[in-house]
Amino acid sequence: MSFRLDDTDRKILSELQIDAGQSLDEIAKKVFSSKTPVWNRIKKMKDYGIIGDTVSILNADKLGFEACFFVMIRTSEHDLEWQENFLQALKDRPQVQEALFIVATNINPFFFKRLAHDFKKKSTSSTCSTISMFKITSNLFDVFSFSGDEHI
């Protein structure tokens, strides 16, 4: 069974990604529909798994996180059990916000992202230059260009 996204579905998804807390009336007005059909479409997309959990994005700066680290760990360890244990250790740490494994060469790097409090008070060293974040989005329609009806 496939789900067919039409223009109204994409508009609803875009609105939810901009602000999932807006009312059905507000979304309906913005997508030129009425409240009940919008609610039915949202429910159908939730039931199908297109729309997942609704969360609030917190402001790390306001919460006192002064730095964000992207940490690279290189390993020559190729044993599947070791890699599974390492990945589980990252999953078990709530401080690790994202974790990536890149298959590139015989040295497979892992990357993870972590925020830190009281960074200005610590002495640190790094082998990389400063990384500046210039854009982050949770809006998939900013990332992917959808044209025509999409099958999911």
Image (cartoon, rainbow, N blue to C red):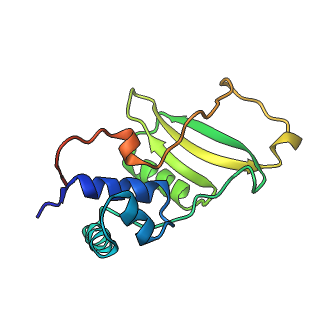
Tell me how many marks there are.
Answer: 0
Up the image or down, 28 lies above or below 7; here it is below
Left or right of 22? Residue 14 is left
Judging depth in this view, the residue of 76 and 127 nearest the camera is 127
The image shows residue 70 at horizontal and vertical percentages of 61, 38
Image quarter hosting the N terminus: bottom left
Q: Quadrant of residue 42?
A: bottom left
Left or right of 58? Residue 147 is left
Q: Residue at x 56, y 37 (%)?
A: 73
Judging depth in this view, the residue of 106 and 113 nearest the camera is 113
Residue placed farthest to the left in the image? 1
The image shows residue 123 at horizontal and vertical percentages of 85, 36
Q: Residue at x 38, y 53 (%)?
A: 14
Up the image or down, 92 lies above or below 110; here it is below
Q: Residue at x 29, y 66 (%)?
A: 49
Residue placed farthest to the right in the image? 121
Q: Quadrant of residue 101?
A: top left
Q: Residue at x 51, y 67 (%)?
A: 21
Left or right of 98? Residue 7 is left
The image shows residue 62 at horizontal and vertical percentages of 75, 54
The image shows residue 20 at horizontal and vertical percentages of 47, 63
Image quarter hosting the C terminus: bottom left
Up the image or down, 23 lies above or below 97; here it is below
